[in-house]
Amino acid sequence: MYMANWSDLPDDMLEYLTSFLPIQDCHRFSAVCQNWHIAAKQKRYSPAQQIPWLALGETDDKKKRKFYDLLEDRHYYLDAPGLRGKVFCGSSYGWLFTLDRKLNFHLLNPLTGEFYDLPPPPPFYEGHLDMYEHDLPRYLEAESDDEEAHGDLREIFEGLQRDFVLKAILDYDPSTRSDFTAVILYGKDNTPAFWRPGDDAWTAVTALPTGLNDIIFFKGMFYTVQSPIKDNYSAIYTFKVGNDPNPKATKINLRVPCHGDHNYVIDETYVNFQVDYLVIFDAKLHLVERFIQWSDDDRRRLTTKFVVHKLDLEGSNYSTCDHINGHAIFLGGNSPVVIGPSQFHKCMEDAIYFTDFVSIDSELYGAEDNGIFDMIRNNTTPHYPHDVFHHTHAAPIWFTPNQWSDEYRSGAVNQQLDTKRNRYHSYTGRRDRDT
């Protein structure tokens, strides 16, 4: 029987095949032979959607950053100087928003090394550091973050580094468009602000109320959700970033009943508070409620349940979902990632993969509030061992590797990936959804 030479397959066919591969397999594909390597570098077809990695803390020597790959159940140790000493406050399209202890703000693709220097969050010390104002120049100009002379200021800045930016997102991928917009929720009131390449500072959107929980880009507009405060209804607002230096905000004529930020019982489970997310799937905007319970000593938190509502923006109505049509949703400090039911067999269907939503401040408990919530069976299983301490004071975050980079496809970045098998097994099995 005659067997064709696989290296002689048509270039167009090879390039098309790479568009179905996860980023790890695309690298292996490129290592087969010279023809396949050239085909893997082309960009004529849209790539397959990638399963997010979990961006973790630094190694003990602080020289590399840890990432965990759910698809292959392994760690990557990336030598990325731009991530050293940084916390992650957002993730979109394979780009990470980072803050260091002096509140230097960056947008970085860790696989390609591409980055943007961003202005500091506005105004980063108002109401927090007024009494230390005369010491600020000395702290900010110090070459070392570890100088004992700045101990008090450093502790304050570390708190701001960890907590000052709740969320940071992008409307478009900077790898494919130069006219992108970055939006953050910052400060004690979670005020929205935006930045575009060429801007000298962030522009606050002052037309919105306080207490915003999340923000997302959908059909040319930014949508944000205000947690229920008094009337137990979540409010949805929208605004558009254009030429107006102070964008106007519009409240959507839609109220979704929620439980609010106080103690209550849901499904016979005592809950302390909730966090709201906005998610897009099946071309619709959805509101996702996350219910969280604190331990008796208020040092540990545990997510007990998720509830998903489909929003009808035109009809000013909503419906509560029993399932999410076989999708897997990745939630946390990142822009939400939605994986379709037929895209990857190792991704659980009708499930919400979630990470801790607040900073890690305990080596005893580590990153405890992480897991996979099964919408059908109404239970939670782990995706990463909660007792692993990540040697950083920031929570893990989902990060989608961006394979549209010449550096990655050429193999330059892969030489930095020191991989080893994870000794823990994650439950990510596919199963049919009950009907």
Image (tube, rainbow, N blue to C red):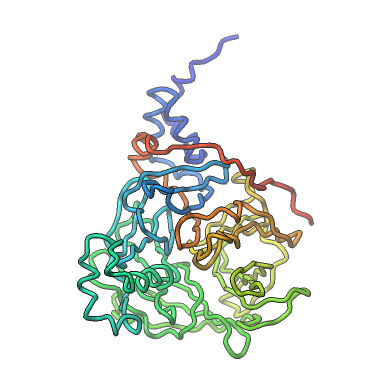
Identify which residue, 33 or 141, lies in the foreground: 141
349 vs 214, left or right, is right
Identify which residue, 362 or 415, lies in the foreground: 362
Q: Residue furthest bottom?
A: 230
One can see residue 42 in this view:
no
Q: Is residue 261 above or below residue 43?
A: below
1 vs 59, left or right, is right
Q: Going 64% across and 71% down the picture, which residue do you hit?
A: 292
Q: Going 36% across and 46% down the picture, which residue do you hit?
A: 63
Where does residue 115 sit, x and y in percent of width and height? 30, 54
Quadrant that contains the C terminus: bottom right
Identify which residue, 298 or 318, lies in the foreground: 298
Where does residue 171 sit, x and y in percent of width and height? 40, 64
Where does residue 153 sit, x and y in percent of width and height? 31, 73
Q: Residue furthest top?
A: 1
The answer to which image quadrant residue 189 occupies is bottom left
One can see residue 296 in this view:
yes
The answer to which image quadrant residue 350 occupies is bottom right
Where does residue 304 sit, x and y in percent of width and height? 68, 67
Q: Going 42% across and 64% down the picture, which residue do you hit?
A: 89
Q: Is residue 170 above or below residue 8?
A: below
Q: Going 44% across and 69% down the picture, which residue do you hit?
A: 167
Q: Is residue 336 above or below residue 27?
A: below
120 vs 222, left or right, is left
Q: Is residue 7 above or below residue 90?
A: above
Quadrant that contains the N terminus: top right
